[in-house]
Amino acid sequence: MARVRPGEAANPAPPTVQRIRVRFAKRGRLRFLSHRDVARSVERAVRRSGVPVSHSHGFSPHPRISWIGAAPTGTASEAEYFEIGLTREMEPDVVRTALDAVLPDGLDILDAVVATPPALADRVDASLWRIALPGVSGADLRAAVEGLMAKDSLVVDRIMPSGKRQIDVRAAVAWAEAGEDSPGGVTPEETGGAAVCAILTAVVRQTTPAVRPDDVLGALDVVAGLKPPVPAKSTRLAQGLLDDSGRLTDPLGSDRVTTRA
Amino acid sequence: MSPASVFPALEPLLPRVSKPVQYVGGELNAQAKPWESVDVHWALMYPDAYEVGLPNQGVMILYEVLNERLDALAERCYAVFPDLEKLMREHRVPAFTVDAHHPVGAFDLLGVSFSTELGYTNLLTTLDLAGIPLHAADRDETHPVVVAGGHAAFNPEPIADFIDVAVLGDGEEVVGDITDVVREWKSAGGTRRELLRRLAHTDGCYVPSCYEVEYGPEIRSVTPVDGAPERVQKRTTSDLDEWPYPKAPLVPLAETVHERASVEIFRGCTRGCRFCQAGMITRPVRERSLQGIGEMVDSAVRASGFDEVGLLSLSSADHSEIADITKGLADRYEGTNTSLSLPSTRVDAFNIDLANEISRNGRRSGLTFAPEGGSERIRKVINKMVSEEDLIRTVSEAFAQGWRQVKLYFMCGLPTEEDEDVLEIAGMAHRVIQAGRAASGRNDVRCTISIGGFVPKPHTPFQWAAQAHPDVVDARLRKLREAVNSNRKLGKNIGMRYHDGQPSLIEGLLARGDRRVGGVIERVWRDGGRLDGWSEHFSYDRWVTAAAEVLEPQGVSLEWFTTRERGEDEILPWDHLDSGLERDWLWQDWQDALAEQEQDDCRWTPCFDCGVCPSTGTDIEVGPSGTTLIPLTVVNPVGRELA
């Protein structure tokens, strides 16, 4: 039986033999989870699921789960990603089912594939957002979006722990569209009972610091005085590499091809 | 009819507040029973912020016990932060539960668990946001019955005006009795007064409005009315193995103060530390069996996915089978990164084998001990008989085995304390560093000393003691800091943490106050007092001002309630509330304290007649059971093999 000796790691951890990439959604009231909340919930779910996650070495072993840019607190997402290291090879579908079964409703696993190079972080440089604006008419939103897109640059201030930062929203927005009836329609949850509900669809490039839906709305306020009467509801629909046509490529696409081959 | 969820009204406010996740519920193992399916609806409140309240074992236990009943449901609520409170008032959103976001005002009962008196203003916030009149006397049949429990409920007099019932002692069984009374009352119909009268005759339930108190300025008399009993006795749950709760601990989505599963390995403590209210009011010692603990740990780890299990009690290393428990669990969870922790360990019950078992499968944290007093003399006064030799020997062994850090807890402002008693803490810390360096052969060992102000509590031998004024405590701690740093070479490895003494004085007012203190609480709350357990929200000046305005016209004062020593014959506000301890025994123990006389533990020496066992009809329940923990086949934390 292994006993802890002075200066020795408490757990000589078994090595990672496989990495699985997972796409998941953050939905409903769970959109109020911060990234840390999501990470903690997933770590615990992994333990409950029995998926053989590998651990870092040393006195304070941590499960090997790595994340890419999380949707901000308060925003929903259909396209969040993490990568998990396993001590034993597994079918990605088994991992997907096992994790989904033990995660709370609202954190839902959508897809899982065996990871292949290049790294996940190199497969994402933009996000597609859908922002529902209850109480705002489609016409008002359209005017504001046109105002924003007509500019070359539009800088908003954001208060950060380190002080005020200036963020060029216009530079990060690849394209934006205003509508009242975008694909999928407007859900009752989005309108919150309001008579009108405009829908903003936009692709926002990854920048540092990241431009969030709130920053885009702040920019629309600056250019056109657009002030939603109730807080907007934002959902990230996709992440990926922005191609010339303005579409995002599926970050797990090439893994899936490799897996099947 | 089921009340409507307030969530649609709450949701638009959430993007505008800090940490909104604390208000949305959705915890793993949370329950949502259909409202219409039961007769009796309980809202259970922990009167502090969600991150503090969620891990509370008391609320978690009662939540499960009540939800297992076919005739009842329980939902939880916590104190909201001032940013959300302001928005809730602006938008007329009432106090809500996090489980189904039902309005608190729609429940039959609001049960509030007070671990500390500093939660009293949070009760008022919730009552007010729920639309429940602050004063029990103003409530009618449509309002919830407000029930206070927890350790602070052993003197509920300061909140007597705001609550309908206080429950003394263990809650597992009495919540069922209360549920029965409320269910029968609802089906038969009747006035609120009739319901309260029936509750006043339920064992363990104290209904303040059934007692009249005369003051002048000491208490002249406490008189039961409406046929209420002269004294109310605490409830004691026997055979903890019959009550294996929580079976499925709540796992929050938000970050909380304790990120672990907890299993209570025994209840009660007879070490007899004279400052310790918990040890006095939870007697006798009742151990959970080795098998029972093994099953609860297994079920908690499976149901939660936590990677740490806390083995809780008032002094965990005192369990009669602690070595077998820790070894059995460490064997069972070998290789699963599941760590154990013993949050309360006495230095004299601790050994390195125990520490090694605890850290075998997980993270090795620092070691923590609580000598409580710096000098041998003061440790005799408080009856915390751990010797410095024991401490130095234990930390030397630990440092030799690879530990690098030890934390020591002390109190300041203890009865009979002089500057020298506190200054000896510095010498102890210096010797810990010296011993640590010698044992480890390294210079970088750490010792953190953490010091709290002592608050005399009801139902302890120190209930008669004068509380030290914050100025005295603060001055002693300044001198201590100088003494720690007087040797720079040792002092640089010693960290010192203490809270200033002012909140302790207010805690003392609330702990030993009577009904006249209720007016102070209300005044402070009306002046904006919220979350008094949080240093960034607590305002000493607000309490001092309110105490002067409310108490002095009645011939008493903040000092009268706190820094004044009481005499043997004075009627104390809680004398009619029976924790089982004989008043004469408590007084004698107080005299023994002043004479620096120690008192042994009745688990290992003959009974010293504190009175609890005969008066509560209970007995010490300790092992050993003589069994061992059969290892489960644990391939991973949940024992489940995936394809």
Image (cartoon, coloured by chain):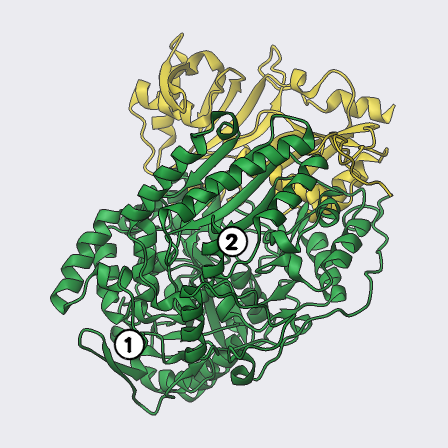
Chain colours: A yellow, B green
Q: Is residue B207 shown above or below A102?
A: below
Which chain is mark 2 on?
A: B
Instruction: Residue type at mark 2: give it.
Output: Leu
Report the front residue among B47 and A261.
B47
Question: Seen in the image, is B174 located left or right of residue B568?
Answer: right
Is residue A241 placed above or below A67 in the rendered structure? above
Instruction: Give the image quarter of residue A23.
Output: top right
Instruction: Please tell me which residue lies in front, A80 or B40.
Output: B40
User: Considering only order in the chain, which callout, 2 or 1, is on the residue closer to the N terminus?
Assistant: 2
Return the chain for callout 1: B
Mark 1 on the same chain as mark 2: yes
Q: Quadrant of the N terminus of chain A?
A: top right
Can you give x and y, in whole percent of width and height, for residue B67 in the image? 57, 69
The image quadrant that residue A63 belongs to is: top right
Task: Name the residue rendered at 39%, 68% in the picture.
Answer: B458
How far is mark 1 from mark 2, CA to CA?
39 Å
Residue B96 placement (x, y as % from top left): 41, 58
Q: Residue furthest left?
A: B553
Image mark for residue B570: 1
Which residue appears at 57% of the width and 33% of the height?
A: B446
Tell me the residue that label 2 is attached to.
B54
